[in-house]
Image (tube, rainbow, N blue to C red):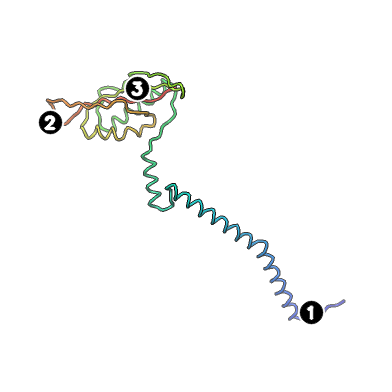
C-alpha cells in the first residue's frame, strides 16, 4: 500500500499535529500551572492581609517602623554560672559607665546575692557602680543601660550634687543593677 501524500496534505497534517500538541500541552501543563499560580497569589494576598491586620505591612514606612521598634526592645542573654556571670556583667557594666563618660570611683562592686527564684532556677545578683560625671552623661547612661544584654533591672539610680562645686556641674552617680545567675 503505497500512499501518495501531496505537499498540501503533508502541511495540513503537520499543522494538525502541532495543533493537537498545543492543545495537549495547554490541557496538561499550562492550565494546571496557571491554576497553581492563581492559588499561590490568593494565599499571598491572604497572608498580606493578615500581616496588615497585625500591624506588619509590607510598605517601606512600616518596615522602617518595625526595625526601629526591634532596636528598642531589649534583648537578654541566658545566665551563666554565678562567678562567670558576675565577671561578664561587671565588665559590660563598666564598659557602659565608661562609654557614657562616667569616671568610676572603682570597678563595679558585687553587693548582694538575692534569693533564688525557684520557678526559674536562677539567683539574682546585684552590682553597684559609682562615679562622677555631668548631669547629661548620667542621663545618657540611664538611657543606654538597657543595651546591656545581661541586665535584668535597675534597682537604684541616685544622683547627688556637691553644693560647694555647683559651678562644675558634676554629679555623683550611684547605680545598682540586677542580673540573673544559674
Image position, residue 62 (x, y; %):
39, 50
How far apart marks 3 and 2 lie (CA) works out to 33 Å
The image quarter in which residue 30 lies: bottom right
**129 left or right of 49 in image:** left
In this view, 84 is above or below 134? above
The image quarter in which residue 77 lies: top left
Give the labeled residue for mark 2: 167
Image position, residue 96 (x, y; %):
31, 31
Are there few (<14), some (14-19), or many (20+) residues within 10 Å of tag 3? many
Foreground label between 1 and 3: 3
**68 left or right of 136 in image:** right
Foreground label between 2 and 1: 2
Residue 126 disc label: 3
Foreground label between 3 and 2: 3
Q: Name the image quarter holding the N terminus.
A: bottom right
Asked which secondary structure carries label 2, the reply is helix
Give the labeled residue for mark 1: 5
Asked which secondary structure carries label 1, the reply is loop
How far apart marks 2 and 1 lie (CA) works out to 113 Å
Instruction: Please report whichever mark, 2 or 1, sits nearer to the chain's N-terminal start.
Output: 1
Amino acid at each position: 500500500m503505497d500512499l501518495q501524500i501531496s505537499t498540501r496534505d503533508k502541511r495540513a497534517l503537520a499543522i494538525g499535529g502541532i495543533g493537537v500538541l498545543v492543545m495537549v500541552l495547554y490541557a496538561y501543563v499550562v492550565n494546571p500551572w496557571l491554576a497553581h499560580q492563581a492559588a499561590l497569589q490568593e494565599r499571598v494576598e491572604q497572608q498580606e492581609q493578615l500581616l496588615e491586620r497585625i500591624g506588619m505591612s509590607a510598605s517601606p514606612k512600616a518596615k522602617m517602623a518595625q526595625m526601629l521598634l526591634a532596636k528598642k526592645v531589649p534583648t537578654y542573654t541566658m545566665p551563666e554560672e554565678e562567678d562567670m556571670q558576675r565577671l561578664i556583667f561587671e565588665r559590660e557594666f563598666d564598659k557602659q559607665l565608661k562609654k557614657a563618660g562616667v569616671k568610676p570611683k572603682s570597678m563595679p562592686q558585687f553587693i548582694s546575692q538575692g534569693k533564688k527564684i525557684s520557678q526559674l532556677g536562677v539567683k539574682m545578683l546585684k552590682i553597684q557602680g559609682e562615679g562622677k560625671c555631668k548631669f547629661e552623661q548620667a542621663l545618657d547612661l540611664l538611657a543606654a543601660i538597657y543595651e546591656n544584654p545581661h541586665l535584668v533591672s535597675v534597682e537604684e539610680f541616685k544622683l547627688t550634687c556637691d553644693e560647694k562645686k555647683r559651678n562644675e556641674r558634676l554629679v555623683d552617680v550611684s547605680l545598682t543593677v540586677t542580673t540573673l545567675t544559674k
